[in-house]
Image (spheres, rainbow, N blue to C red):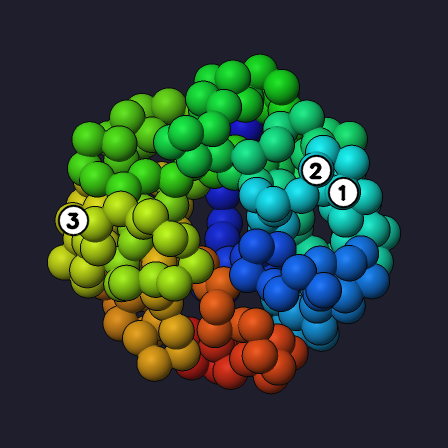
Amino acid sequence: MPELLWLPKLYAILDVGCLAPPLRTTATIVSYASDLAAGEVTLLQYRNKVGTTCEILEHARAIRQALGSGVTLILNDRADICIAAGYNGVHVGQQDLSPEGARSVIGDNHILGVSTHNPEQLREADAGPADYVAFGPVFATSSKRDHDPVVGIEGVRAARATSSKPLVAIGGITRANAKSVIDAGADSVAVISDLLSSPTTAAEEFLRLLV
């Protein structure tokens, strides 16, 4: 595990569940990932809660092949597929494989991220094997149907004071509010919905705003 992981300010998430079913093809998903990379995205999480294991592995490998080594790739939830697809790390939620279990699968040379939604979860993750912690939702979000209570900007400030690890803020983050989240202490902002339309342009605009 790295002593201190450096995170880019934009943490892009490609969430297959946010795509219309006809667009959940390998070709479309790879095209979308490539568009994000063209917008200078250097860290991308592939998230798929709707596909089969075979589909997730196929998509993950195709993204890896298309993007090469220029983008750090994180696999949501599936530590086994992270290894099989040659990804750089895995991200687990509160209902997924435990951080300790994930670390035992991916070893010390891969990145491990953990989602947290309240101070107790954040403290537990900070004391565990994760390389970074995600905290949110900061704002109301449409990317998750049953999301945890909104923490707001003050929640991000409190999280920064609580955790010594790199902090990723997530939930309802857009180009209109991203700078305020970074100013509150987040190292990086995770974005799903506001990258869906014109992903190359959207990513470029995020990065200009967050310089």
Q: Which residue is mark 1?
A: 55
Instruction: Inspect the image, locate mark 2, and give the three-letter code of the amino acid beneath it.
Output: Thr
Answer with the quarter of the image where residue 169 lies.
bottom left
In the rendered image, residue 167, in percent from the top left (x then y), is placed at: 36, 48
Query: Residues under labels 1 and 2: Cα distance?
Result: 5 Å
Is residue 4 something one can see in this rendering? Answer: no
Tell me if residue 204 comes above or below residue 146 in the rendering. below
Q: Residues within 10 Å of mark 3 (few under 14, many from 20)?
A: some
Residue at point 48%, 68% (across, down): 193
| Circle nearer the N terminus (1, 3) | 1
In the rendered image, residue 4, in percent from the top left (x then y), is placed at: 46, 39
Query: Residues under labels 2 and 3: Cα distance?
Result: 38 Å
In the rendered image, residue 29, in percent from the top left (x then y), is placed at: 73, 61
Q: Which residue is mark 3?
A: 158
Q: Which residue is mark 2?
A: 52
Disc ID at residue 198: none
Answer with the quarter of the image where residue 77 lies.
top right
Residue at point 46%, 63% (across, down): 191
Tell me if residue 31 comes above or below residue 151 in the rendering. below
Front position in the image: 15 or 206: 15
Q: Residues within 10 Å of mark 1 (few under 14, many from 20)?
A: some
Tell me if residue 160 comes above or below residue 11 in the rendering. above
Q: How many marks?
A: 3
Instruction: Inspect the image, locate mark 3, and give the three-letter code of the amino acid beneath it.
Output: Ala
Whether label 1 touches label 2, CB < 8 Å: yes
Instruction: Inspect the image, locate mark 1, and give the three-letter code of the amino acid beneath it.
Output: Glu
In the rendered image, residue 48, in percent from the top left (x then y), is placed at: 61, 46
Residue at point 67%, 43% (across, down): 51
Q: Say what secondary structure mark 2 lies in.
A: loop
Q: Say what secondary structure mark 1 lies in.
A: helix
In the image: residue 72, left or right of residue 70: left
